[in-house]
Amino acid sequence: MAITTTTRSPRPAAPVAERRPRARWGARAAPYGYLAPFFVLFAAFGLFPLVYTAYVSLHRVELQTSQQMDWVGFQNYTRLLEDPFFWNALRNTFTIGVLSTVPQLVMALGLAHLLNYKLRGRTFFRVAMLMPYATSVAAATLVFAQLFGRDYGLLNWALSSVGLNPVDWQADTWASQIGVSAVVTWRWTGYNALIYLAGMQAIGHELYESAAMDGASRWKQFLHVTVPGLRPTIIFTVVVSTIGATQLFGEPLLYEGNAGGGISHQYQTLGLYMYEQGWSFFHLGRAAAVAWVMFLLIVLLALANAAIAARRNRTDR
Amino acid sequence: MTTIQLQKPVRRRPGTGRRSPLQGGPLAYAVLIGATALFVFPFYWTLVGASRTNAEMSSASPALTPGSNLFHNIGEALQQAAIGTALVNSLIVACTVTLGVVLSSTLAGFAFAKLRFRGRSLLLAVTVGTMMIPPQLGVIPLFMVIVKMDLQNKLPSVILPSLVSAFGVFFMRQFLIQALPDELIEAARVDGASSLRIFWSIVLPVARPGMAVLGMLTFMATWNDFFWPIVALSSQNPTVQVALRSLGQGYVQDQSIVMAGTLIGTLPVLVVFALLGRQIVGGIMQGAVKG
């Protein structure tokens, strides 16, 4: 019994030579066995929908009868290009993207720099900074919508108590876009700070030592040691947050609770526009076309990022 | 004597002179404390809102401290948006998904990290490549699939598509490349251990720290997932995030009840975070260096 069940027994039951072919076949097939659970589900629920979206976008498909697809060619796309709300959403995605990504990454860089100092309670600071990351889009947005309330929001109360005019954080275009961006910035700044911090800790301590010996101020050290050393990390975060900004959906949806993105669609993003097309107006085919446009946008942004990074590298050397 | 003892552990790095360039000054503390306050304040404000009445919240001079209405508001929130069902649903979904992602990622991550086979680099490239593509892109066909499978408004519609994660596979691969020495597998193979046995008694124990980090990240992400559950589930059988949305959507919005719901929906993750925050921070920083 013991001999047949345990492979670790000093004397194997079957001679090694006899078992070879089977064992070798097993060894060759084993990797695919390990991959199977992942790839079966990944193919069904990950890859197939990605590819199939393009096909759906060339059809008229309505939500209620989603099994029935009528070929319409590029009609969904031409309709998009004629829809002023599509262009509005594209513009908003861009402005909200800039309003949320730039302050987020700049603040993260500054905070990471401070967290890289020798500090008491550094773990506390790190954990506190990551707490917003642990909250959901829904929870964060609901709380911020309350803080940004026009009549009874805390922010307007604070503004008026120092003698400033209250701001209409809902109806005003820029103010509402700032409000939506604030949720994004709050949730992701700490996360990015930690990623920068990890990158900073990989920069050799000696570099700072020698820079200090040469009389470089802290600001100079930051500019000439930290930032160049972090370049790959910075590019990584720019790419990731740009992609995130392109898909922005939950924040504008819950800021006032409707899929239109404000009374005059003043903060409707592409992600929200897609949801509105598909699940408020029931046009799944058109929604698929929006999804495909979003994808092309992301590819373009990624290529632009890569080109800028490559150019930077060339001018440096 | 005492001062020397106190100072010694601070200057641990060799060659760091008196004026270490990375010594934090008072300004650093001030900025960090200010930033921490900004990061933590919305949580405090949720608690304030959740423990007050709507009238107190919507007055010209809002209350700034927690009140006494917390349990009443939580009761109301539980009634209004099926938050009880939602909590159970979210727990089921998050636990199942976490288990699936950790297991499938460890298996596939091990194969990618340590085994040689045909098509390895192509399959890995496909896996990593799709990490760049937003999940929203696939939502419409995915929706059509679950309608066809008659899974709409049922929990499997949220569980099935999330059971595997390309990020998870990549994460475990990076972890195992580092943590698992090739010699260990070779030695086991020479001893005649089967492939499955190698995985069970050598890979799994080594992979445990990576699996723990991936598990925490997956649990948090699944608990907080918003877009797909909104599409796939109705407000009758919601996850917590879907329930929060219907709370925020009411015609007459009672802000204190919205805040109470938010508090309930956030609390479980915050508890996880309070217990394991240090490891989560470590995991994110680790993943960042490698990614």
Image (cartoon, coloured by chain):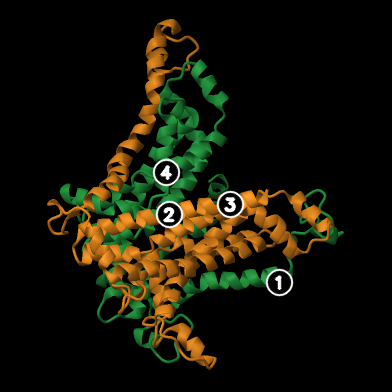
Q: Which chain is green?
A: B
Residue under circle 2?
Answer: A300
- State which tag comes first along the sequence, 4 or 1: 1
Front tag of 1 and 2 = 2
Numbered marks: total: 4
Front tag of 2 and 4 = 2
Q: Nearer the viewer, residue A140 or A239?
A: A239
Identified at 57% across, 49% down, the residue is A310
Q: Horizontally, is B160 left or right of B39 in the view?
A: left
- What type is the residue that disc 4 sits on? Gly
Marks 3 and 1 belong to one chain: no
How far apart are labels 3 and 1 at the CA level? 37 Å
Identified at 44% across, 70% down, the residue is A95
- What type is the residue that disc 3 sits on? Arg
Q: Chain of mark 2?
A: A
Identified at 68% across, 50% down, the residue is A203
Q: Which mark is residue B27?
A: 1
Residue under circle 4?
Answer: B129
Marks 1 and 2 belong to one chain: no
Q: Is residue A37 above or below residue A311?
A: above
Q: Is residue B238 above or below residue B164?
A: below
Answer few, some or many: residues within 10 Å of disc 4's Cα (few below 14, many 20 plus, some between 14 and 19): few
Q: Which mark is residue A311?
A: 3
Residue B149 rendering spot, x and y as whole percentages: 17, 47
Residue farthest along the right direction in this orientation:
B1
Identified at 33% across, 57% down, the residue is A293
Residue A186 rendering spot, x and y as whole percentages: 49, 68
Secondary structure of the residue carrying numbered label 1: helix
How far apart are labels 2 and 4 at the CA level? 15 Å
